Amino acid sequence: MARFKIPDGWVVQAYRYALDPTPAQERGLASHAGAARFARNHMLRLVKAVLDQRSAERSYGVAEDVLTPVLGWSLPALRRVWNARKNSAAPWWKENSKEAYNSGLDSLARSLESWSKSRGGRRAGRPVGFPRFHTKRARASVRFTTGPLRLEPDRHHVTLPRLGRIRTHESTRKLALRIENATARVLSATVARDSDGRWCVSFQTLVQRTTTRPAHAGIRHAVVGVDVGVKDLLVVATPDGAEVDRVPAPRSLARATVRLRALQRKASRQQGPYDPQSKHKRLPSKRWRRTQALIGKAHARAASIRRDTVQKATTRLAQQHLTITVETLNVSGMRTAGGACKRGLNRALADAALAQVRRMLAYKTIWYGSRLVEADRWYPSSKTCSGCGSRKPRLLLAERSYVCEHCGLVIDRDLNAAINLARLGETHTLSERSPAGSGPVAGRGAMQETGPAPAGDAAGCETSTPPQHPLDQTGTASPQGEAA
């Protein structure tokens, strides 16, 4: 089946709104999310049983043609089996929308496909394990693709299948005007419960956007380099060495640590869902539940502050500069190694959300007509001197100032890295304007660090391919932007 292709001039964008449901509607939302989890776990249990049965039959020497029939892992195959078993497995299935069960089956189909491709070496990235069962403590969510999915004219209510009209905590005017002007169309709606217990709805929409730059955001620089870090979230510099902007890391989780530590100690003294003496599950107390709700609100507030800081900083970058050069960091790999000795650094990396900067710039540069240049993972932006181009063999994380042993330059290490990234972006821009066959070649990459190069050249490797639409090759949804 052909994948959905986005028309030219349109993008996939998400609008997220907090909900204020009534107690009855909140029970309905929880019921739909539980139905999705039940359908996923039920079919996963069946898939696992078939795989175990076939493995046992092979151990007995049974021929391949007489083994237990294989259960299809695609969404249509899982849906057919579920429809045949739902009357006996879930006689209450009519209480919820069919989209709830389809959400769980779609999640299972995607998980099985990722595991199969990873096992066969057809999936890039870290190995993916076999799908796990979802517990009640997992994030509750359900996705609606058919039925009434609309925003009400009063700008403060949305209508969802089987759930009816639900009030929103904020106005839906921005998306409603686009729908009324026929410049947006709702594709699906995902309802999820955050860690603080609040329900939110995300409308995945097809939006007609023109590449325009806001009038109030004038172009400040043609090329800038952006260095991300734990102490300063963003350090922006130009190729000539001028510091344009410096955004401190929000450190929202670190500021909430004192309160979280007190709440978690309080919860440990209360009756939780697990009895350490009998080593059995038990019914938690109401006070433990209230303490867990406060812990979730503290985490949700830290995440909101972090997301707000990154959203505003990346929007300014995409609106005020033409070419933006960023690093391609393996943030997940940076957090795995080290064990207990890197616990503080791992927490700081998670609190900074370094990977979100490049992800947000990827689609915001398309919106505002800018260009994103991604430096290769092995590009030594921090080790290279921005004055003479020499490179240090090693630079400790504790060294906050870069001291060059050749030219004697003393400069802030983050600013030095941002200048090198800006010159890399400038080199890429000039190479695109030069005749064919000269300058850096687009797509040429290095698998390891290379030797030193002059400060203005591309030392190492740069990803010089202009940003493409996220659906040009993969056919999947583009990064979702949040409505302001």
Image (spheres, helix red, strand yellow):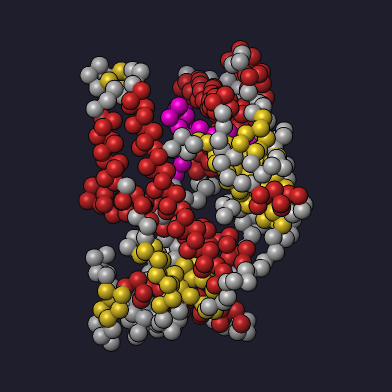
Give the residue at x 71% y 52%: 177
Relative to 438, residue 130 above or below: above
Q: Front-most of 128 and 472? A: 472
- Total numbered circles: 0
Find out whether residue 139 is within the magenta segment.
yes
Residue 407 image point, x, y percent: 28, 87
Relative to 431, residue 282 above or below: above
Q: Viewed as shown, does residue 344 lie left or right of 136?
A: left
Residue 57 image point, x, y percent: 50, 20
Q: Viewed as shown, does residue 228 lie left or right of 66?
A: left
Which segment is the magenta one?
Answer: 127-144
Give the residue at x 27% y 70%: 400
Give the residue at x 57% y 32%: 21
Q: Front-most of 160 and 205? A: 160
Relative to 178, residue 248 above or below: below
Picture quarter with the C terminus: bottom right
Picture quarter with the N terminus: top right
Q: Front-most of 125 and 456? A: 456
Locate residue 435: give its quadrant: bottom right
Q: Main secondary structure of the magenta part?
A: loop
Residue 300 can be seen, yes or no:
yes
Residue 150 image point, x, y percent: 70, 39
Locate residue 110: give its quadrant: top right
Residue 284 image point, x, y percent: 34, 21
Residue 72 can be seen, yes or no:
no
Residue farthest front in this picture? 154
Give the residue at x 32% y 63%: 231
Find out whether residue 72 is within the magenta segment.
no
Locate residue 33: give its quadrant: top right
Relative to 203, residue 50 above or below: above
